């Protein structure tokens, strides 16, 4: 092999190499998200929160550290639901995910604040099992018949 100009490079064991690549990926994603975070302005003085969790996933949350509880009127800081991110996402996909998170947080707050007869009837915190029981009741829905809807349409025109 005297004429060969290629050098052999000793690679670390596969397990160590994947950890090293994973660390590199985390750092690169952290830098990308830091740049995106610096360019964001969210409504209501909300803060963008990018998190890398112990399972190895990146996610985004809307955070309001100065929130007031809609029920008690007391300070109640909150973070919205977790929106999963991937290092394979484009910058546009990440920003659109942040936007969707903001829209969902706005809708959440509106559902809590919208009252009918003094009650937040669209509150997002209902017990899902109780909603299931309500829906299983025969008289739980209030609908018009198709014939009534058609008649209303004809009378309006």
Image (tube, rainbow, N blue to C red):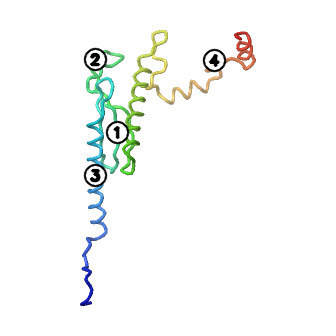
> Which percent across, then down, holds residue 2?
24, 90
> Which percent across, then down, holds residue 101?
39, 33
Q: Is residue 71 left or right of residue 20?
A: right
Q: Which mark is residue 142?
A: 4
Q: Earlier in the sequence, mark 1 or mark 3?
A: 3
Q: Which residue is mark 1?
A: 60
Q: Which residue is mark 3?
A: 28
Q: Which mark is residue 74?
A: 2
Q: CA distance from mark 4 to mark 2?
A: 36 Å
Q: Earlier in the sequence, mark 3 or mark 4?
A: 3
Q: CA distance from mark 4 to mark 1?
A: 38 Å
Q: Please say if the residues under marks 2 and 1 sit with CB atoms less than 8 Å apart.
A: no
Q: Earlier in the sequence, mark 3 or mark 2?
A: 3
Quadrant of residue 137 within the rendered picture:
top right
Q: Earlier in the sequence, mark 2 or mark 1?
A: 1
Position of 17 relative to 63 (above/below):
below
Residue at (38% x, 30% y) in the render: 102
Q: Secondary structure at mark 2?
A: loop
Image quadrant where one finds the C terminus: top right
Q: Earlier in the sequence, mark 4 or mark 2?
A: 2
Q: Is residue 137 left or right of residue 28?
A: right
Q: CA distance from mark 3 to mark 2?
A: 40 Å
> Which percent across, then down, holds residue 69?
32, 19
Q: CA distance from mark 3 to mark 4?
A: 53 Å
Quadrant of residue 21 within the rendered picture:
bottom left
Image quadrant where one finds the N terminus: bottom left
Position of 145 relative to 46 (above/below):
above
Q: How many marks?
A: 4
Q: Please say if the residues under marks 4 and 2 sit with CB atoms less than 8 Å apart.
A: no
């Amino acid at each position: 092999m005297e004429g060969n100009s290629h050098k052999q490079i000793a690679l670390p064991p596969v397990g160590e190499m994947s950890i090293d690549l994973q660390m590199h990926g985390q750092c690169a994603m952290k830098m990308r998200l830091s740049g995106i975070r610096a360019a964001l302005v969210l409504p209501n003085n909300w803060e963008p929160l990018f998190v890398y969790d112990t399972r190895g996933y990146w996610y985004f949350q809307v955070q309001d550290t100065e929130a007031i509880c809609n029920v008690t009127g007391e300070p109640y800081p909150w973070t919205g639901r977790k929106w999963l991110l991937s290092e394979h996402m484009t910058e546009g996909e990440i920003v659109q995910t942040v936007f969707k998170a903001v829209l969902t947080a706005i809708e959440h707050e509106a559902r809590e604040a919208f009252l009918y007869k003094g009650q937040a009837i669209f509150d997002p915190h209902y017990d899902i099992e109780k909603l299931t029981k309500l829906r299983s009741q025969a008289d739980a829905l209030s609908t018009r018949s198709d014939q009534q809807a058609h008649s209303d349409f004809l009378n309006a025109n």
